[in-house]
């Protein structure tokens, strides 16, 4: 694929820019349109209804930062789509940023958002679980604020029904074709390949895009996706309720469950499960056998007094059991799936999301995954909870019988339920399959936010309805990994490279090599060698030690089966 160079000097006449746009709108990648200088990309030259260009700036190369933050010389274009006034009286628009490197590889990447969006993240093409970014690799990249510029800690945009839809799916559907027109204007040709990559809510966005906007993408990577995200948000409220019941006077969940407690639980899981894959190495790669072998009630002793290094107080033990079993209403009906038992429960990332971020201020994320997200965004009509105490009171009063069902609600104003605007309308991916698109989903088995079992359930349903599902969609579980990264895991891997080989060369990923991050405290604490690698296997395969293999640090010693 030939590289294309973008111009960084201002053209003397806008007529050429207009002519280039008109030519670009009529053809494909080989239409021979004249590239437009960066600073000449304006609302007037773009000439697309409802789209504004706020700025077009040539950005010099950055090489003095971290590997993930450095970038080549490029053109940065920012603007808005569909400016309007919401029914709550506030101004709304879908903010976007497009960055186009001076030397272009001919490819386009949509950078998935995070949390409840609300901020316009730099469109560097964040490549989760790597030490690079897509802009450095020559991609033209776009990012979006999800249709509201309220900031990540403010979920009140959920009072506006269109803002909900923009957040759930419409921002991606609107920004993608507009950004491609900007790319076409800048380079004189359209992208030859288009990809989407995101993790967490961005992973959910990738799955939604694979369903709703399959015509816009050749391949997508969905990391730790928030499938059934409204249900997972209810799970977070359930977690808070259970943890607070186990907390003593004046305690918060992080106090009631100190690191030593979670280390102990992790060690008990390892004692039962570590050797099930043939290697005692601190990684449980045989997830299926582990869930059968480990029994929390039996294998984690209960204390008659306070916590010790060999037992868990009954209140703490009951709370953890209920959290891992998944949220239920008063008649025992499951409202979200359960969580796999995995030694990654001792990870820093697990602790942050499960015990520190969700229940209480001053951390801002509590409003995203607890009271704010459920009350403002996922309940119809909105509950509009008071967040004076970071929503702790709202979460403790929340009823799994009467409040949780509101995520399925609709009204004359809020015509889409939370599950409708947040989930893929076609989880069977018929459109993606028909155009030979590809989807890679990966999920850490110790994710404390979105259960890896939900991704497993999705893939099982897909495979049961289509015996050839593996020809266009594959799921990779990452043992020990927490939410998008972290935990005692080999959490360094390049899913985008695997996707490119699948899309462009027809090489379906039968394994993906993953390594450790030596800087991760969960790795340093366990004294894992920096050279440790493991194969990540396409579900339902799992990595198993090859008989007679001696090198427990090498992926070559394991086979997917």
Image: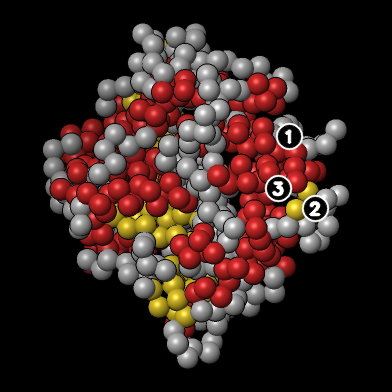
Position of 13 relative to 441 (above/below)? above
Left or right placement of residue 328 versus residue 4 in this view: right
Q: Which mark is residue 201?
A: none
Position of 154 relative to 351 (above/below)? above
Q: Which of the two residues, 365 or 126, is positioned nearer the viewer here?
A: 365
Question: Which corner quadrant holds the N terminus?
Answer: bottom left
Q: Which residue is mark 2?
A: 303
Judging from the image, the colouring scheme is secondary structure
Q: How many numbered dots are placed on residues in this image?
A: 3
Which comes sooner in the sequence, label 1 or label 3? 1
Secondary structure state at the residue bearing disc 2: strand
Q: CA distance from mark 1 to mark 3?
A: 11 Å
Left or right placement of residue 461 versus residue 357 in this view: left
Find residue 133 and report its horizontal and vertical position in percent. 47, 56
Q: Residue at x 45, y 50 (%)?
A: 453
Q: Which residue is mark 3?
A: 317
Q: Which of the two residues, 263 or 520, is positioned nearer the viewer here?
A: 263
Secondary structure state at the residue bearing disc 3: helix
Q: Are marks 1 and 3 in contact (CB under 8 Å)?
A: no
């Amino acid at each position: 694929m030939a590289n294309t160079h973008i111009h960084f000097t201002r053209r003397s006449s806008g007529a050429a820019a207009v002519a280039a746009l008109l030519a670009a709108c009529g053809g494909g990648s080989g239409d021979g349109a004249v590239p437009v200088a960066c600073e000449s990309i304006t609302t007037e030259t773009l000439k697309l209804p409802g789209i504004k260009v706020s700025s077009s700036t040539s950005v010099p190369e950055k090489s003095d930062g971290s590997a993930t933050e450095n970038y080549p010389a490029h053109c940065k274009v920012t603007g808005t789509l569909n400016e309007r006034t919401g029914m709550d009286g506030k101004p709304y628009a879908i903010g976007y940023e497009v960055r186009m490197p001076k030397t272009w590889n001919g490819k386009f990447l949509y950078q998935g958002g995070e949390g409840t969006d609300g901020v316009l993240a730099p469109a560097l093409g964040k490549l989760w679980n790597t030490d690079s970014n897509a802009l450095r690799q020559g991609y033209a990249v776009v990012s979006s604020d999800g249709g509201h510029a309220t900031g990540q800690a403010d979920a009140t945009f959920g009072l506006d029904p269109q803002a909900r839809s923009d957040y759930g799916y419409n921002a991606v559907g609107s920004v993608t074709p507009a950004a491609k027109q900007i790319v076409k204007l800048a380079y004189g040709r359209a992208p030859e390949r288009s990809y989407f990559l995101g993790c967490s809510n961005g992973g959910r966005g990738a799955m939604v895009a694979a369903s709703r906007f399959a015509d816009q993408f050749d391949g997508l990577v969905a990391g730790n996706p928030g499938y059934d995200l409204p249900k997972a948000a209810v799970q977070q409220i359930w977690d808070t309720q259970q943890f607070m019941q186990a907390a003593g006077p004046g305690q918060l969940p992080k106090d009631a469950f100190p690191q030593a407690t979670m280390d102990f639980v992790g060690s008990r899981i390892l004692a039962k499960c570590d050797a099930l894959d043939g290697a005692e190495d601190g990684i449980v790669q045989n997830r299926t056998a582990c869930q059968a072998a480990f029994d929390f009630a039996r294998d984690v002793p209960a204390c008659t007094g306070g916590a010790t290094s060999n037992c868990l107080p009954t209140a703490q033990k009951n709370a953890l059991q209920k959290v891992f079993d998944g949220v239920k209403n008063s008649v025992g009906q499951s409202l979200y799936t359960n969580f796999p038992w995995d030694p990654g429960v001792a990870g820093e990332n697990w602790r942050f999301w499960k015990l520190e971020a969700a229940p209480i201020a001053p951390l801002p994320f509590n409003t995203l995954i607890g009271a704010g997200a459920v009350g403002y965004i996922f309940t119809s009509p909105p509950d509009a909870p008071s967040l004076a105490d970071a929503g702790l009171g709202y979460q403790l009063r929340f009823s799994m019988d009467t409040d949780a069902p509101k995520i399925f609600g609709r009204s004359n104003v809020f015509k889409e339920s939370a599950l409708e605007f947040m989930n893929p309308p076609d989880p069977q991916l018929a459109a993606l399959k028909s155009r030979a698109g590809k989807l890679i989903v990966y999920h850490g088995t110790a994710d404390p936010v979105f259960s890896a079992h939900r991704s497993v359930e999705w893939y099982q349903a897909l495979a049961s309805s289509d015996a050839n599902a593996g020809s266009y969609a594959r799921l990779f579980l990452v043992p020990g990994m927490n939410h998008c990264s972290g935990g005692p895991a080999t959490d360094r891997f390049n899913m985008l490279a695997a996707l490119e080989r699948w899309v462009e060369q027809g090489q379906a990923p039968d394994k993906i090599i993953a390594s450790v991050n030596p800087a991760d405290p969960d790795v340093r604490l366990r004294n894992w060698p920096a050279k440790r690698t493991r194969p990540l296997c396409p579900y339902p395969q799992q990595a198993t030690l090859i008989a007679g293999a001696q090198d427990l640090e090498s992926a070559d010693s394991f086979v997917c089966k």
